[in-house]
């Protein structure tokens, strides 16, 4: 059954969702128009459909922090925030569809009085995300645009069986922490035919232990036919204290931005307390990438002294790159990278070194055609030396 929402506010949207849920489920349809709103809660068996021209619009940041209610994050609140515009906690069979828009009104949350070219100042209050789903099953996002989030755009934690297709995620590059989609401890996720243009990482795989006593796994994530643009990273894998990320695939990706294309950094600065590094990443493939970036096209790096469980079986096939820095593969003495393959990689690097490797075991290189474009021109300087060679 369809539930048509014509009254233009979030309270009317919530009422329609609750009415549909009490009847066992249904499709809540937003007619064209702007719907100012605080947090909207999804329920079991609900499709929230935004017609073309319908906009769920976050209320002004300076006056509405209480409108964005806390929603359970199950242990960890990234960026010190549990607030969001669309919330789903432990629900099943839900969808957000249509050609409409979810707009976070992000500019209203920031101090924009900063020098030209710098990011806006974060407010002292927790900033809401646009869509936040925790411990949900059978989720679908199709057709929608997610715009101007003051924080992460889409956060999926502990979710299973997720299909995301034909969405747009757009944010001002002067915002902070404007991640496109964070998939934390999720499984069976398919993302296709979508566009991400964000201030922070476009796509992130995480495996945060929300309860330190319960293992966390992010697995079986497939991303296909997507266009990415970011001042940070296109695809990011893990942080040092994460658990296991495995068996994932990224295919037919275009990335353009000032940051890096594929980024997996294991640094001390992100280490949780009482941890020396726990991350374990394996069996990840990257196929058919076109990368034009200001930093690294591929960066896999473990900071010295850290000892994650492992990063291995990462395969990069059919890459065309134009980058400011080289392909960078660095393990540590305690945890070397293992079984890394680069196949059919071509392009130019605006550096004196197209490929940097350290602490890598079983590195496989095939069909590599890279050119280092620049290098330091050291002027000739004669020195005095006692060798007989200098006497002629």
Image (tube, helix red, strand yellow):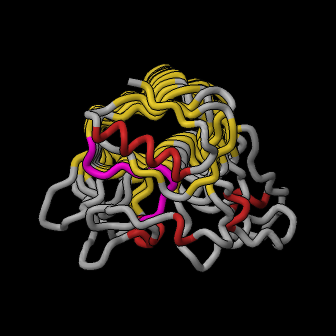
x 73%, y 58%: residue: 174
Residue 222 location in percent, x, y? 37, 28
Quadrant of the frame with the N terminus: top left
Quadrant of the frame with the C terminus: bottom right
Which segment is the magenta one? Answer: 82-91
**Along the horizontal axis of the image, is 362 left or right of 146?**
left
Up-down relation of residue 327 to residue 273 (above or below): above
x 36%, y 35%: residue: 46
Residue 90 within the segment the image draws in magenta: yes
Q: Quadrant of residue 180?
A: top right
Residue 157 visible to the viewer: yes
Residue 358 visible to the viewer: no
Residue 42 location in percent, x, y? 38, 45
Residue 361 within the segment the image draws in magenta: no
- The front one of 311 and 13 is 13
Q: Quadrant of residue 127?
A: bottom right
Residue that extends furthest to the left in the rendered view of this protein? 213
Residue that extends furthest to the right in the rendered view of this protein? 116
- The front one of 201 and 134 is 134
Q: Quadrant of residue 5?
A: top right
x 73%, y 60%: residue: 107
- Magenta stretch, main secondary structure class: strand
Residue 321 location in percent, x, y? 63, 30
Up-down relation of residue 329 to residue 372 (above or below): below
Residue 260 location in percent, x, y? 59, 46
């Amino acid at each position: 059954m369809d539930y048509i929402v014509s009254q233009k506010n979030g309270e009317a949207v919530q009422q329609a969702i609750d009415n549909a849920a009490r009847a066992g489920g249904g499709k809540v349809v937003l007619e064209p128009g702007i719907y100012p709103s605080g947090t909207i809660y999804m329920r079991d068996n609900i499709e929230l459909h935004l017609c073309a021209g319908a906009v769920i619009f976050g209320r002004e940041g300076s006056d509405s922090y209480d409108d964005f209610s806390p929603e359970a994050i199950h242990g960890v609140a990234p960026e010190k925030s549990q607030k969001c515009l669309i919330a789903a906690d432990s629900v099943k069979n839900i969808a957000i569809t249509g050609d409409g828009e979810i707009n976070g009104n992000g500019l209203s949350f920031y101090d924009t009085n900063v020098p030209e070219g710098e990011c806006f100042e974060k407010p002292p209050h927790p900033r809401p995300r646009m869509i936040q789903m925790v411990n949900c099953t059978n989720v679908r996002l199709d057709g929608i645009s997610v715009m101007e989030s003051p924080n992460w755009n889409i956060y999926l934690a502990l979710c299973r069986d997720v299909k995301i297709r034909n969405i747009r995620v757009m944010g001002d590059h002067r915002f902070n922490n404007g991640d496109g989609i964070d998939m934390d401890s999720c499984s069976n996720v398919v993302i296709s035919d979508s566009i991400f243009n964000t201030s922070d990482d476009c796509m992130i795989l995480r495996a945060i232990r929300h309860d330190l006593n319960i293992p966390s796994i992010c697995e079986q994530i497939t991303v296909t036919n997507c266009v990415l643009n970011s001042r940070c990273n296109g695809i990011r894998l893990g942080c040092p204290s994460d658990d296991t990320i495995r068996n994932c695939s990224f295919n037919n990706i275009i990335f353009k931005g000032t940051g890096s294309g594929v980024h997996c950094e294991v640094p001390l600065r992100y280490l949780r307390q009482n941890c020396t590094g726990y991350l374990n990443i394996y069996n990840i493939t990257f196929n058919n990438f076109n990368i034009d970036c200001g930093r690294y096209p591929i960066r896999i790096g473990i900071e010295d002294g850290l000892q994650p469980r492992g990063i291995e079986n990462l395969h990069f096939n059919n890459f065309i790159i134009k980058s400011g820095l080289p392909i960078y593969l660095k393990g540590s003495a305690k945890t070397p990278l293992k079984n890394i393959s680069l196949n059919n990689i071509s392009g130019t690097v605006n550096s004196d070194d197209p490929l940097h490797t350290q602490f890598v075991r079983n590195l496989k290189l095939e069909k590599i055609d890279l050119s280092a474009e620049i290098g330091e021109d050291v002027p000739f300087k004669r020195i005095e030396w006692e060798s007989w060679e200098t006497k002629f």
